[in-house]
Amino acid sequence: MSNLVEENLSTIRQQMKIACQASGRDPQEVQLLLATKTVPLEKLQMAMQAGEVLFGENKAQELRDKFPLMEQYNKVEWHFIGHLQTNKVKDVVKYVTLIHSVDRLKLGQVLHQQLLKENRTMDILVQVNTSYEESKFGIAPEAAVELVEQLSQLETLNIKGLMTIGKLGATNEETRGCFRLLKSIQSQIKQKNIPRVEMDVLSMGMSGDFMVAIEEGATIIRVGTKVFGERYLPDSYYWNENVHLK
Ligand SMILES: *Cc1c(COP(=O)(O)O)cnc(C)c1O
């Protein structure tokens, strides 16, 4: 049985291969995460049936709704990719194996307290605002190394790498600049050999720029629109606390 989601996925898988070949990378190094905000369950199931196993949500509420419906497919894994409010931490850690969006010490501390209570650990990425856009979350690039050092003291958090959202609506070269900046922060942190900090994961690249991201070293790309089609909510709803829908 063929459907649009399946076709889109096979196009993306092909493009991922092309980008890997172009940059001399092993396709095995790059994971495809499907960004599922606002996507109805039927489409998620099509993606699963096409063999996809990694999904990302932006909001605790949507995660809570979708998780039980997908749980029957035991191979499925969820990551949290959205802005995480401290009052949602308890909800989110229940469902996910990696949080991409830790961008402030306070959030790290709240996560740590919750994980201590549950006697467990959590893998995280530090989100960096490489485009310097006000409407995006993420720590400023200049402050990223220090934040990683501070978070590394919280022993329930396993820092696995970095995440960024490239500049949107920009030229390929501008976007490439964001990804290179993330990669250079990764190298700086690696050189410091901070105890307990691993820096192998780079989560970068979305529908419009994932090939560039792969060329620049992405190990997880996060794709929504190109698989599932346009969303009915603007991204500002997810990315900017100051924007409210009327
Ligand atoms: C929505 C979203 C994506 C996917 O964006 P598309 O342009 O639809 O591929 C990736 N990362 C984050 C953090 C998102 O919120």
Image: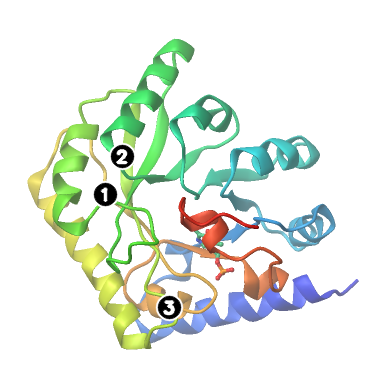
Is residue 70 left or right of 203 when viewed as pictured? right
Q: Which residue corresponds to mark 1?
A: 199
**Point 46% across, 47% down: residue:** 83
Residue 191 is tagged as none
Which quadrant of the picture is home to ligand 1? bottom right
Q: Amino acid at mark 3?
A: Cys
Label 2: element kind: strand
**Point 62% across, 66% down: residue:** 224
Identify which residue, 227 or 24, lies in the foreground.
Answer: 227
Q: Which residue corresponds to mark 2?
A: 159
Mark sitting earlier along the chain (3/1): 3
Q: Residues within 10 Å of mark 1 (few under 14, many from 20)?
A: some
Q: Residues within 10 Å of mark 2 (few under 14, many from 20)?
A: many
Q: Residue furthest right?
A: 1
Q: Which residue corresponds to mark 3?
A: 20
Residue 78, how many percent across, how many down?
59, 44
